[in-house]
Image (spheres, helix red, strand yellow):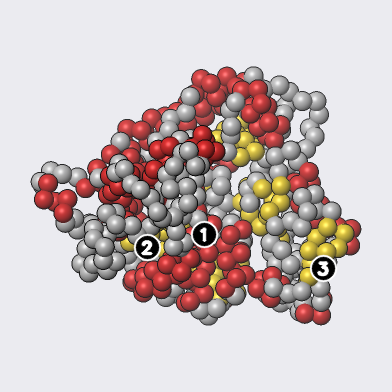
Amino acid sequence: MPPTLVHTSSDRMGAAHDPQTEAPYADALRKLSAIDWARLHVPAHQASAAHAPGIAALLGERALSLDFPMSVAAIDRETWRAAQPGRATPLARAQDLAADAWGARRAWFITNGASGGNHIATTVARALGPTAVVQRSVHSSVIDGIAHVGLDPVFAAPSVDQGLAAAHGVTAEQIEAALCARPDASSVYIVSPSYFGAVADIAAIADVAHAHGVPLIVDEAWGSHFGMHPQLPTNAVRLGADLVVSSTHKGAGSLTQSAMIHLGHHEHARRIEAIADRVVRSFQSTSCSALLLASLDLARRDLMVDGKQLIGAAVASAEAIRAGVKASPRFRDATPDLLAFPDVVTNDPLKVVIDMRGAGITGSEALHTLITDHHVYAELATPAALVLLVGATSPADVDRVLMALHALPTSPGERDRMRPLPAAGSRAMGVRDAFFAPTRVVRWENAVDQVSADSLAAYPPGIPNVLPGERLTPDVIDYLRTMAATPSGFVRGAHDPLLDGFRVVDDPTRATER
């Protein structure tokens, strides 16, 4: 069992006091902002609504007053001295409470989202060695990180629901095979849950990784609320993962761009703690937003204090929407589809996945109509599916959602249906070599069999369809151009929005097949 956080000053308030009711960083920030300061420091707006009228009109004067820099007196330290040995700052105490809440050995607050967290995690992976077993459907930020640090990925292919065009996860057996084939691999990097809410068998995969003497890194961006309620899946760090990237704003309710990194309890987690701490510090801004940091502190407190009731209500609202979908002759609940795959052990009940293939309207068209006609904004739309995200502490307005869904018009024909995900092209160069190679831009008609210099990921869902160093196939080119032309889609990393041109490696002689 994970060790319990040792509480100090808060324990003086009595044995019955629960430290999780505190928000040390947010409270210190609130106290600091209540003073009538003559500010002569950054940020340059200096909390003056008169001198920052645009920001004040958008966010309010209160937000300006809370926008302090890091390491200011009375919040990160109590005197003018910058170094105070033995004193835990409000931020450090807030991170300790977060670690306790999620069952981690340690937690770091980060303010560049899970994408920044993935850059941190790939750097940690590279510090362990040049080779890692990596799930092929990782987020594009993982591929960017791999390119930047020169990590050599050994890819494990996820299962794919071609009907919904949804990539799920990998199995412990796949990771076992990959590690046996590449005993030089120094880490394993997977994604769970998927964008569609499919959860992999983290415990089994962690056991396999540890048996081979390597740590397990999990991108749990979409599962930041996991482990906070009996009706939710257990979070990855409690299941044995060693380093976990958690996009707290996605499911747990902090402000956009705020996230956390959690460290596990296995011996491999302890082994990487020092390098992880150094890497977090090297990536983290020295001017972190106090608003983002405070939102992480408060989101954790809200989950721990009111979470049980609110999460229960949120899950009930998601189930009610699912029941309304099942009762409709037009729509279909796709949850059974997710659970039919051998790599999926459970699903996120707060992700409502609606199969739109028999609805008489594509998911993309449905999203547009929901937004424009009903002011209902769904998380994800593809031609084949519509995915609703219910916040862990934000129960949905079930009647409004179902009324809007049932009011969707039908469209003639079956146009813009989801195409199956194309197979990746062969790997011709290393990811880093291709990313930093001299490039040229070619017309899409001439891009076939050329080596991509870019990581190209069709959004939704943001999983790279082609990596730097992979050859561009006709199927990949057609798929990316089709997705870029859909109303709700775009391709991250593309040279131009419609992909009329592709950025490729200039010197093909550098491309040697692997």
Above or below, 300 relative to 180:
above
24 or 172: nearer the eye?
A: 24
> Residue 108 location, x and y as percent?
38, 59
181 or 191: nearer the eye?
A: 191
Query: Which amino acid, mark 2?
Result: Leu
Q: Horizontally, is 139 left or right of 222 in the view?
A: right
Where's the C terminus, which quadrant? bottom right
Where's the N terminus, which quadrant? bottom left
* Marker disc for residue 388: none
**Dot 3: within a 10 Å radius of its alpha carbon, few (fewer than 14), some, or many (20 or more) residues?**
some
Locate residue 468: give its quadrant: bottom right
> Residue 298 location, x and y as percent?
34, 44
Which residue does the numbered mark 1 point to in the structure image? 116
**Dot 2: within a 10 Å radius of its alpha carbon, few (fewer than 14), some, or many (20 or more) residues?**
many
**Dot 1: within a 10 Å radius of its alpha carbon, few (fewer than 14), some, or many (20 or more) residues?**
many
Say what secondary structure mark 3 lies in. strand
Query: Which amino acid, mark 1?
Result: Gly
Mark 1 and 2 residues: CB-CB less than 8 Å, in contact?
no
> Residue 280 location, x and y as percent?
43, 66
Observer-side mark, 3 or 2, equals 3
Above or below, 429 relative to 392:
below
* Marker disc for residue 263: 2
Which residue does the numbered mark 3 point to in the structure image? 440
Give whichever of discs 3 and 2 has the lower sequence position: 2
Question: Can you see residue 246?
Answer: no
Query: Which amino acid, mark 3?
Result: Arg
Mark 1 and 3 residues: CB-CB less than 8 Å, in contact?
no
Give whichever of discs 1 and 2 has the lower sequence position: 1
Q: Horizontally, is 251 left or right of 265 in the view?
A: right
Q: CA distance from mark 1 to mark 3?
A: 28 Å
